[in-house]
């Protein structure tokens, strides 16, 4: 039969018990904040043995969050928790000391591989807020037959894809196509090289080349205004 675990896990010391330990007889700031946030639960249930445990209504170690369901393995860092309230209301937390793996999409009832390719097998959606995928000491790899990155935004400050690297961004492909509907710019404060071992074609309705020779005196066809704007970093 399940038994209540309140006497072990779910009841924090009462205010009177802590007051007896306080020589001044006054509840300190840290103690007072604990009374305001500590959870109390008289209906928690739990089952377990030397391999693991499952509890319903367990209060976390900091006494601030009640877990609806918590699964614990033999290693305390290997656990799965569905939290109910406070700062982790509606949270689902899984922690593992080893690998965390999800595998799906086998579809044994579908015979043709071509029929399986277009199916949405793994779906992750955040209705609000951000999705963060972080490898603190490793790499993030995306592998697929095709990879599509799509950013949609209604205003000019939305719908952006941003790549930032502390060292290099390296792209290799048989063909590299870039289309910008309004504006396209490549810039560097140092050296830029454009190399074509075959034929290099440049086309523009008007092609203008500007150097720092126009810094003191503008050329007959202009260019100093553009040169000044580039130097100012605009």
Image (tube, helix red, strand yellow):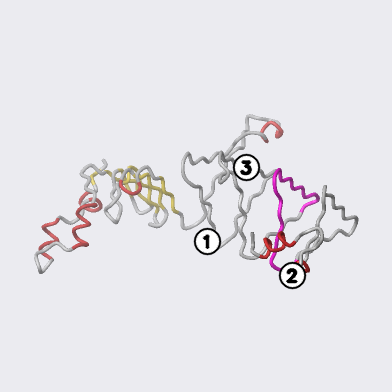
SS at mark 3 in the image? loop
Write the residue at 61% across / 49% down.
Answer: 161
Q: Which residue is mark 2?
A: 216
Please report the bounds of the magenta region as a residue range: 173-191
Cβ atoms under marks 1 and 2 closer than 8 Å: no
| Residue for badge 1 | 136
Q: Residues within 10 Å of mark 2 (few under 14, many from 20)?
A: few
Q: In the image, residue 15 lies at what x, y percent?
A: 14, 56
Kindly report the distance in space between the C-alpha atoms of the residues bearing marks 1 and 2: 51 Å
Residue 164 drawn above or below residue 214: above
Does residue 87 lie above or below 116 as drawn? Answer: below
225 or 84: nearer the eye? 225
Give percent across and percent down for residue 129: 47, 45
Which quadrant, please, contains the C terminus? bottom right
Mark 3, Cα crowd under 10 Å, few <14 / some 14-19 / many 20+, is few
Badge 1 local density, few (<14 within 10 Å), some, or many (20+)?
few
Which picture quadrant has residue 102?
top right
> Which of the two labelled residues, at mark 3 and mark 1, occupies the earlier sequence position?
1
Left or right: 50 as drawn, with respect to 217: left
The residue beneath circle 3 is 150
């Amino acid at each position: 039969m399940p038994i209540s675990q309140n006497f072990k896990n779910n009841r924090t010391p009462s205010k009177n018990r802590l007051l007896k330990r306080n020589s001044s007889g006054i509840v300190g700031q840290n103690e007072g904040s604990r009374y305001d946030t500590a959870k109390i639960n008289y209906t928690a249930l739990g089952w377990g043995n030397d391999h693991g445990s499952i509890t319903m209504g367990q209060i976390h170690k900091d006494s601030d969050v009640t877990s609806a369901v918590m699964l614990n393995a033999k290693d305390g860092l290997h656990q799965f928790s569905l939290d109910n309230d406070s700062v982790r209301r509606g949270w689902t937390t899984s922690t593992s000391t080893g690998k965390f793996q999800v595998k799906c999409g086998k579809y044994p009832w579908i015979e043709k591989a071509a029929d399986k390719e277009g199916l949405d097998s793994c779906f992750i959606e955040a209705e609000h807020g951000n999705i963060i995928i972080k490898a603190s000491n490793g790499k993030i790899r995306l592998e697929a037959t095709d990879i599509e990155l799509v950013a949609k935004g209604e205003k000019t400050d939305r719908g952006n894809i941003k790549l930032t690297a502390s060292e290099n961004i390296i792209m290799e492909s048989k063909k590299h196509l870039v289309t910008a509907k309004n504006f396209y710019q490549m810039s560097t404060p140092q050296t830029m090289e454009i190399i074509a071992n075959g034929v290099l074609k440049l086309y523009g309705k008007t092609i203008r080349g500007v150097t720092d020779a126009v810094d003191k005196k503008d050329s007959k066809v202009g260019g100093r205004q553009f040169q000044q704007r580039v130097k100012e970093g605009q």
